[in-house]
Image (tube, grey):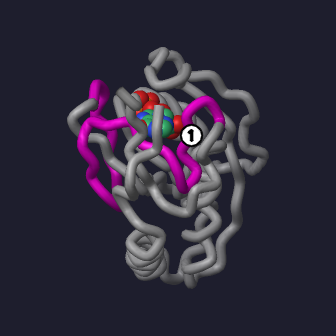
Amino acid sequence: MVVGKPLFTEEEIQAKVRELAGMISSDYEGREPLVVGLLKGAFMFFSDLVRHIRVPLRIDFITASSYAKADTTGEVKIHCDMREDIENVDVLLVEDIVDTGITLNYLRERLLARAPRSLKICALLDKRERRIVDVPIDYRGFEIPNEFVVGYGLDYDNKYRNLPYIAIFKRSD
Ligand code: IMP
């Protein structure tokens, strides 16, 4: 397996992050959202995004997984849940990539059951072709083709997360 040339360069990603943070800052004017990062994949996107959001905010994380190597198991496991109480709170869930939508749909239902004031979703990448469950994405970075990608937090077998760009991961033959 090899990492191909960048699908999105570091500069393109950073420009998109600033654009998303700008929209979020305007929409949340006068409010103090709780921004929740989905680990591990969203760690880099999350930290870049929050540093450009201009409203006061709090942060929390959920560690979940639904993937075994390069294929989905269709089953979501919560390894570490968030610590903040979200009742009557404006929650913004930050995800690296929406693929089948199973993970996000599961987490969304779980969070909505805790009665937040609002719940919005921000995802850097949208692999729309692969969608099985329809989930609303309020802030979308890039739509991508049906390819497995790594870098900028996204992994294959917990590797390549540190790449500052996003690339397609392919068999070498
Ligand atoms: P979903 O539940 O199928 O939408 O999958 C969402 C999760 O699968 C993401 O949070 C990623 O961790 C992982 N995932 C989906 N597509 C990719 C990919 O192309 N590269 C790396 N991880 C992916």
Q: Which residue is mark 1?
A: 155
Q: Quadrant of residue 91?
A: bottom right
Tell me residue 32's x, y (percent).
61, 72
Q: Residue at x 31, y 28 (%)?
A: 133
Query: In the depicted view, which residue is nearer to us: 33 or 78?
Result: 78
Query: In the depicted view, which residue is nearer to us: 48 or 170?
Result: 170
The residues colored magenta run 131-158
Query: In the depicted view, which residue is nearer to us: 58 or 101?
Result: 101
Q: Residue at x 62, y 77 (%)?
A: 51
For the question of whether residue 79 can be seen, the reply is yes
Q: Residue at x 38, y 44 (%)?
A: 168
For the question of whether residue 109 can be seen, the reply is no
Query: In the depicted view, which residue is nearer to us: 99 or 91?
Result: 99
Tell me residue 88's x, y (percent).
60, 55
Q: Local crowd at mark 1 within 10 Å, few (<14), some, or many (≥20)? A: many
Residue type (three-letter) at the residue carrying disc 1: Asp
- Total labels: the figure holds 1
Which is the main secondary structure of the residues drawn in magenta?
loop
Q: Is the residue at mark 1 in contact range of ligand 1, meaning its CB lies under 8 Å from it? A: yes
Tell me residue 65's x, y (percent).
60, 29
Assign a secondary structure to mark 1: loop
